[in-house]
Amino acid sequence: MSALITTEILGEHPSLTSIATEFDISTTWIRGGEGLVGFGVYKKYEVSGEDRFKEAHKWWQQKLAEFTIQNNVHGIGTGPILFTSFAFDPRETSELIIPKIIIGQRNGKSWITWIGDQKQPDIKKIEISSQSGEITWANGTVEEEKWRNQVSKAINAIKSGQLEKVVLARDLKANSSTKIDINNLLQKLEIEYPSTWVFLVDGLVGATPELLVRLNKSLITSRVLAGTIQKTGNEDRDLALAASLAKSSKDLEEHEYAVKSVADSLAPFCSSTNVPESPFVLHLSNVMHLATDVTGVLNDSAKQTDIFTLIENLHPSAAVCGSPTNVAKKLISQLETMNRSRYAGPVGWIDAQGDGEIAIALRCGELSDGNKSIRIFAGCGIVAGSDPITEYAESQAKLMPMRTALETL
């Protein structure tokens, strides 16, 4: 039996983090005030294993075949939407969600999509509450000294010629005396980090600056980040730090591996690619990154290539794993002693045409215990010139977006 999916223009232009429907918020994808917010869960599916991207594609196509779509808006991101949150490791569980209601906004246009033959759902404006519970922090899976020892071992492996780069992650755990207010958390992340993609998929919430892949018709875009320096809050000092980052041989080396892994993964599908000769410095509220936007155009033989195939070929990139990939993955499993779950995995959305935006789940946390607990993550790229103390400080800076947002709810 088919399900009716209707997409209509919204006369109003709501702030996406301050709206509600009869269903709880379930999924979010916002950048610079634009994006998609989903409410309720129409269908949810879990995948794991080496073929998880193919299985996810197959399930999405099966669901689309069951829909009767009435799309009066058209364009990327309209109509039925699949939100995805893949685990870093194929052995772990990845989540696929089709919301019951989706509200979208782009280029001054707002729309609503809903499933079922009922009339257009009501939208309510909500006030963000200033009331929140007390946050208490606990040690993560790996304590500081042990993590720095892991970094030392990784540096030794690199210097001995086993690999060129590896990314090591760590976590922190927090408990709240009351349920963490999701809308409030999302709004804080959106306000503080407007140039990031603010996301929520099945309890994984964060504000990531790294776009794994965007597919819009035949145009592919990927934003690569690698190489980081913490900001001081002093404008003149930060400008000097940005200049030093742009000249840092250690950070440029780390960045080069990340860009090459993305460009090499996209090359078989593209008739042309554009890889800038040098990165730019991306300024966020707390840190600065070396960044490169890699673009490409699908070649004729790849016109039917779907975004799931691109994700499969891009993940894991050197930005979250290392180089060479297989050697880095093996070293991570030996050293890290931590389950990344969906941290550093592909997260985002895909529409009925196969277009979509998929980021890497960074600067994020995974909610549990009825939203009263959260585990937040950070990772650092280790190369021959890395220093364990400096890398630990960098990981602390990368934890700050989620720490600050949680502590100021």
Image (tube, rainbow, N blue to C red):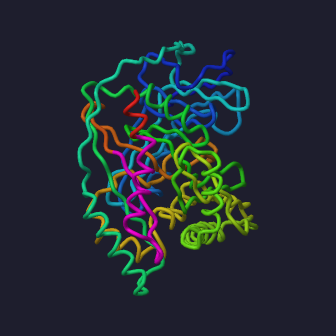
Is 375 contained in the magenta span? no
Which one is nearer the viewer's eye here, 185 or 391? Answer: 391
At 31% from the left and 39% from the top, the residue drawn is 374
Residue 384 drawn above or below residue 131? below
Q: Position of residue 78 (x, y in %)?
A: 64, 33
Q: Residue at x 29, y 32 (%)?
A: 135
Q: Quadrant of residue 195?
A: top right
* 40 shown above or below 273: above
- Residue located at (34% from left, 28% from top): 180
Picture quadrant of residue 258: bottom right
**Foreground pick, 323 / 140:** 140
The quarter of the rendered structure image containing the C terminus is top left
Between 3 and 166, the one lying in front of the other is 166
Q: Is residue 9 visible?
A: yes
For residue 377: magenta?
yes
- Magenta-highlighted residues: 376-402
How many numbered marks have been drawn onto this rendered protein structure? 0
Front one among 100 and 260: 260
Q: Residue at x 42, y 66 (%)?
A: 167
Spot occupied by residue 141 in the image (x, y as percentages of width and height): 24, 54
Q: Residue furthest bottom?
A: 160
**Residue 175 to residue 235: above or below:** above
**In the drawing, does residue 33 fall left or right of residue 400?**
right
Residue 301 in view (yes/no): no
Where is residue 405 drawn, in percent x and y? 43, 34
Q: Position of residue 119 (x, y in %)?
A: 56, 13
